[in-house]
């Protein structure tokens, strides 16, 4: 029986297609076609051998069409073909690890998170260069049902081998129970945060939390793994506070507007009036649970002005960030979710007045002839802290 | 200078350490002697001067067809026939002329195009049958493979646009018959490229051919009553005019709209380059720039345009290949002039036809090294591409990293004399690193290449301490070239293997001064 994995063709980049046929005898035979054969042909053959040996395969016929796949992709594709043949289910081939920054902070800035379809390795390698606060390796909606298994291996290898720079490393797993299989494959490679799609109950968050705790024990990991549930239905929104406070590992909640509007049977519009209640409710629940509120995504990549308007009103509602489906959206999100220079300067003067009052032991803070109420001081303190986190203030 | 023997071909090692033939197509050559190391000398070559009495008094130089024109030009075995490439991949005229020559029965012609294109691949049949002996001019696609595989009888000679002008001017290449495709012409031979159904903009690449060739044939599909205005090609240099139904395929002559790259990574490179030009102070009132028509460089122009607007900065001139992005600059008052070498899209063609500030130039004014200067060295910053660059900032534009011919030199070498030369390249393509230890084919010496901008960072040539200083504090990712190279090799899984090149030179790369910079070696 022959199994296959991966993709090839004129328009495919950074991937390979392999047809794998286990044999009884004859050793490993590789028929290789590669657009980088003169440069990496020998290395590619050697790696394929290494992957097969690691997976315990001694005899097989492989036909490989390579479109310039990087080593972490080569390994994932070969392993997927082998596993699809029902072999090596307990074994894995892992690429050379990159050095990763330490685990992300619970309250780090999350203005933008760039979605990367888990089945498209060509987008992984340069994603961090565009400077999003986070990248999301997506195993859920952007991955076809038949590619779930192969994408899981790709995402595992990417988490291990790809340098995502200073980005928070997020994986969107599938809904449970498939999501538990995803977790088992990826936790050892230490993503910072897990996005939980279509969350409707606190119990779902707790199931994931427990599964992660179990995997942490198995892999002897002590670090935190943060959670960000996505609320994508009327019920999810109704349970927003329970979900946001379901686990101390929840650092943010977000909304999926495509599914939410579909659930309500309303049309998603550019003004978002149909989801205003849900988004307001989510923001309120997030703040009540002391977690961040993160907005959905803006689907029209060409409409930069629309995105800007959406982000500005989103920030005004109390959101801290938004999902991005294209790198060109990142700069707009960062600008919109950051306080303006005027806001920062005003807040700084309030903070200075507050500190001076503290210093003098005065109970009342005043700026010029104006008295400043305590909540205004609190808001100014938050804004300055946030501006600092974004590098806008020294 | 060391002389080695490879087969019958004598090779010399030039100042860049590259092995080059001492004789090419029967003509003795000078090895590259370094930047400014060689001074071309001598007088201008000249065609025989003819007299008005040999031409119709009524000015009508038309003949029925190309075959007649070629016969009346005295076509013989071994002659040099030239053509220009302003019609790009849509050109029909060069092959019409060569096919007519084949019907006449001559052999061993040298075809001397300003560049060849993939649609002209049937020139291979003409070389196989012996009509054409060899091509001196850029070759890519099937023609490039034919040459690289060693199937061409003569040696390929790759010259820059400026170098081609010089070769003609100096008589290194004597054009017997120039065949000039003209989108508009009158019966006297005045011709222009900016009007007509096959309009292509400037005809600058054909100017030297029209001045220096023994005989000149203008071929048009849009004959207008005398005078054809403007007349970039002057009928006083023209022997015969031939009318044909079509000189080319308009869809392939100019693109309807030039496309900016959509690749986020390439847009990032363009953004870095634009910010570099702005933040180092190169972008200032009265400055000038040139950018190629590749996806990254077009995006650069678009980004720079926004930055110029925001800063209220205006350029004195910009240098084309023109596209709608340069035309927008002109129309928005962000530049006084476009000095155009070739016109790539419909917006460019419309503009050059109607706006006197959009000026057609030739390689004589822009690029010719053997002359009293040229304006390429007046340009403040130029943004170009490359297939490979090396750690010494040398670059390759003519071959793939496997040694096969890929591109002509075009104006690329000539542009390197700008105040700041920036190569905008992805750090790897399909797993193949672009930054290597040593380029496969040396096309541009690193002394003239100031900046290499990739999506992983910007490397400044250590020779340009001034640019290093200017870029400080800009927040741009300025990195040593070795750093970027090491990072890419880590991503790609190690250094790429070196391709195996043959030891027979199948083509040579000339430097702008006419010396030999490198050889292209046979690859099977």
Image (cartoon, coloured by chain):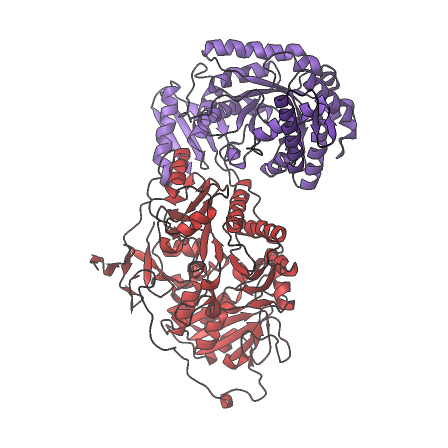
Nearer the observer, B492 or A14: B492
Whole-percent x, y for residue B210 in the image: 48, 75
In the rendered image, the quadrant that contains the N terminus of chain B is bottom left
Whole-percent x, y for residue A313 in the image: 72, 32
Left or right, residue B423 beside residue A362: left
Nearer the observer, B111 or B338: B338
Going by the picture, which residue comes out furthest to the front?
A360
Give the total of numbered labels: 0
Tell me what hue chain B is rendered in: red
Seen in the picture, residue A366 relative to B315 is either above or below; the reply is above
Question: Does residue B259 appear in the picture of this structure?
Answer: no
Nearer the observer, B347 or A99: A99
Seen in the picture, residue A352 relative to A361 is either above or below; the reply is below
Seen in the picture, residue B172 relative to B318 is either above or below; the reply is below
Q: Quadrant of residue A132?
A: top right
At 47% from the left and 67% from the top, the residue drawn is B363
Whole-percent x, y for residue A338 in the image: 63, 33
Whole-percent x, y for residue B166 in the image: 40, 70
Question: Does residue B295 appear in the picture of this structure?
Answer: yes
Nearer the observer, B217 or B104: B217
Tell me what hue chain A is rendered in: purple
At 58% from the left and 44% from the top, the residue drawn is B262
């Amino acid at each position: 029986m022959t199994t296959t994995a991966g993709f090839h063709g004129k328009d495919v980049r950074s991937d390979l297609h392999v047809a794998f046929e286990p044999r009884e005898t004859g050793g490993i035979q590789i028929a290789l076609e590669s657009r980088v054969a003169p440069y990496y042909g020998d290395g590619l053959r050697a790696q394929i051998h290494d992957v097969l040996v690691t997976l315990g395969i001694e005899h097989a016929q492989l036909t490989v069409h390579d479109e310039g796949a990087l080593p972490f992709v080569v390994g994932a594709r070969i392993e997927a073909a082998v596993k699809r043949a029902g072999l090596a289910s307990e074994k894995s081939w892992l690429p050379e690890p990159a050095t990763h920054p330490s685990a992300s902070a619970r309250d780090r800035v999350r203005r933008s998170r760039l979605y990367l379809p888990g089945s498209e390795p060509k987008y992984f390698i340069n994603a961090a260069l565009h400077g999003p606060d986070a990248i999301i390796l997506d195993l859920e909606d952007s991955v076809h049902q038949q590619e779930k298994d192969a994408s899981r291996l790709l995402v595992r290898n990417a988490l291990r081998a790809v340098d995502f720079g200073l980005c928070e490393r997020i994986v969107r797993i599938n809904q449970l129970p498939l999501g538990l299989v995803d977790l088992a494959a990826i936790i050892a490679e230490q993503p910072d945060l897990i996005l939980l799609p279509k969350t409707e109950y606190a119990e779902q968050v707790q199931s994931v939390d427990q599964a992660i705790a179990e995997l942490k024990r198995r892999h002897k990991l002590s670090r935190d793994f943060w959670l960000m549930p996505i609320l994508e239905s009327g019920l999810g929104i109704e349970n927003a506070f329970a979900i946001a406070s379901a686990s101390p590992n929840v650092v943010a909640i977000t909304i999926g507007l495509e599914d939410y509007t579909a659930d309500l049977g309303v049309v998603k519009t550019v003004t978002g009036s149909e989801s205003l209640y849900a988004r307001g409710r989510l923001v309120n629940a997030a703040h009540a649970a002391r977690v961040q509120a993160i907005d959905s995504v803006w689907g029209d990549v060409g409409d930069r002005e629309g995105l800007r308007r959406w982000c500005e009103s989103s920030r005004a509602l109390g959101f801290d960030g938004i999902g991005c489906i294209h790198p060109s959206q990142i700069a707009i999100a960062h600008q919109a979710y950051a306080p303006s220079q005027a806001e920062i300067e005003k807040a700084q003067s309030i903070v200075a007045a507050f500190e001076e009052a503290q210093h003098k032991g005065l109970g009342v803070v005043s700026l010029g002839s104006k008295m400043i109420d305590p909540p205004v001081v609190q808001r100014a303190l938050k804004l300055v802290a946030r501006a600092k986190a974004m590098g806008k203030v020294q | 200078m060391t002389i080695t023997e490879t087969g019958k071909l004598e090779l010399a090692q030039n100042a860049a350490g590259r092995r080059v033939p001492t004789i090419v197509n029967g003509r003795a050559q000078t090895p590259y002697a370094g930047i400014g190391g060689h001074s071309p000398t001598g007088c201008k070559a000249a065609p025989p001067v003819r007299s008005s009495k040999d031409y119709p008094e009524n000015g009508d130089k038309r003949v029925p067809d190309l075959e007649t024109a070629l016969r009346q030009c005295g076509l013989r075995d071994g002659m040099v026939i030239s053509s220009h490439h302003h019609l790009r991949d849509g050109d029909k005229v060069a092959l019409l002329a060569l096919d007519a020559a084949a019907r006449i029965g001559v052999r061993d012609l040298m075809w001397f195009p300003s560049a060849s294109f993939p649609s002209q691949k049937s020139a291979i049949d003409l070389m196989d049958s012996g009509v054409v002996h060899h091509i001196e001019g850029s070759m890519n696609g099937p023609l490039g493979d034919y040459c690289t595989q060693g199937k061409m009888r003569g040696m390929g000679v790759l010259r820059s646009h400026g170098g081609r002008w010089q070769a003609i001017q100096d008589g290194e290449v004597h054009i017997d018959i120039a065949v000039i495709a003209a989108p508009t012409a009158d019966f006297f031979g005045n011709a222009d490229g900016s009007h007509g159904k096959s309009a292509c903009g400037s005809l600058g690449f054909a100017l030297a051919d029209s001045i220096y060739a023994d005989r000149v044939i203008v071929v048009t599909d849009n004959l207008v009553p005398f005078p054809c205005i403007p007349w970039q090609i002057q009928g006083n240099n023209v022997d015969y005019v031939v009318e044909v139904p079509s000189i080319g395929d308009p869809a392939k002559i100019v693109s309807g709209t030039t496309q900016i790259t959509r690749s986020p990574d390439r847009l990032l490179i363009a953004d870095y380059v634009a910010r570099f030009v702005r933040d180092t102070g190169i972008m200032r009132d009265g400055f000038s720039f040139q950018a190629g028509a590749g996806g990254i460089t077009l995006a650069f122009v678009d980004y720079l345009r926004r930055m110029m607007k925001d800063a209220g900065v205006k350029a004195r001139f910009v240098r084309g290949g023109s596209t709608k992005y340069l035309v927008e600059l002109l129309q928005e008052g962000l530049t006084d002039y476009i000095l155009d070498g070739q016109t790539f899209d419909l917006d460019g063609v419309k503009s050059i036809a109607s706006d006197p500030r959009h000026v057609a130039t030739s390689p004589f004014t822009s690029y010719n090294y053997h002359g009293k200067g040229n304006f390429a060295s007046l340009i403040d910053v130029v943004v170009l591409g490359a297939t490979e660059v090396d750690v010494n900032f040398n670059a390759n534009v003519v071959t793939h990293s496997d040694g096969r011919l890929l591109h002509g030199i075009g104006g690329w070498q000539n542009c390197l004399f700008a105040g700041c030369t920036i190569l905008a390249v992805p750090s790897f393509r399909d797993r193949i690193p672009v930054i290597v230890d040593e380029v496969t084919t040396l096309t541009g010496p690193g002394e003239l290449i100031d900046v290499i901008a990739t999506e992983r960072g910007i490397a400044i040539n250590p020779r340009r301490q001034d640019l290093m200083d200017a870029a400080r504090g800009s927040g741009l990712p300025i990195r040593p070239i070795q750093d970027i190279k090491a990072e890419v090799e880590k991503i790609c899984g190690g250094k790429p293997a070196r391709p195996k090149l043959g030891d027979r030179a199948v083509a040579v790369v000339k430097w702008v001064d006419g010396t030999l910079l490198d050889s292209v070696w046979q690859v099977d």
